[in-house]
Amino acid sequence: QKEVEQNSGPLSVPEGAIASLNCTYSDRGSQSFFWYRQYSGKSPELIMSIYSNGDKEDGRFTAQLNKASQYVSLLIRDSQPSDSATYLCAVPGANNLFFGTGTRLTVIP
Amino acid sequence: GAGVSQSPSNKVTEKGKDVELRCDPISGHTALYWYRQSLGQGLEFLIYFQGNSAPDKSGLPSDRFSAERTGGSVSTLTIQRTQQEDSAVYLCASSLGGTANYGYTFGSGTRLTVV
């Protein structure tokens, strides 16, 4: 049973545009959500966490959570080539995080 | 230490040999996790340690896999009689507490290649 679903992409956006990454989850009781960024050949890096419905902004990144619809999204404003990576959504289980398979983002200069 | 430290960074082994992978979590982090990531695949949970509690081994794929955590700090993942399908990047992560409130910090991983 998949806990977290993401579009695998790839998603390509031009430099300076807004990149929108989406994730749906199956456990209606989930209370916290995480976005990780993984550069090719590197390990995942936590970039955003969100616990409440609505938006959470951190620099160029905005996480959006809608518990009623069971989705969480990540917006990247003014996308840069350095944002090119795979973005993983994660939701807690009993003892561990369940990760989506990730969305590969390419920002085209 | 400042981050999660894993060793070795790369390991090539012959099929049938045993390997040990080491993880040193961030100081003070009570929770430690092992995941593996095969080429082009998602993160697969293997095992979870929390303080002195019994580990959650529910993700271990076979009895060839085992892990221990000594003194609540360093952990070793052992794979016996390695098979080619064990080839993957093995990632260790640690966190301050339960996953409900804290994200993980990952180590840089051990790339295991079984030939």
Image: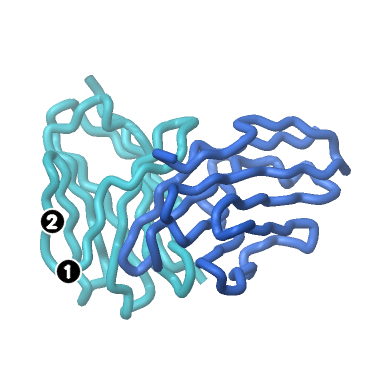
Chain colours: A cyan, B blue
Q: Secondary structure at mark 1?
A: loop
- Three-letter residue code for mark 1: Ser
Please give the label number shown on residue B76. Answer: none
Q: Which residue is mark 2?
A: A56
Find residue A65 and report its image quarter.
Answer: bottom left
Which chain is home to disc 2? A
In percent of the image, x 64 and y 68: which residue is there? B57
Q: Secondary structure at mark 2?
A: strand
Q: Position of residue B101 (x, y in %)?
A: 31, 66
- Three-letter residue code for mark 2: Lys
* Left or right placement of residue B75 versus residue A9 in this view: right
In percent of the image, x 67 and y 62: which residue is there? B60
Which chain is home to disc 1? A
Find residue B2 and report its image quarter.
Answer: top left
Distance from the alpha carbon under mark 2 to that under mark 1: 9 Å
Is the Cβ of the residue at disc 2 closer than 8 Å to that at disc 1?
yes
The lab-note entry on whether marks 2 and 1 share a chain reads yes
Q: Position of residue A83 (x, y in %)?
A: 27, 32
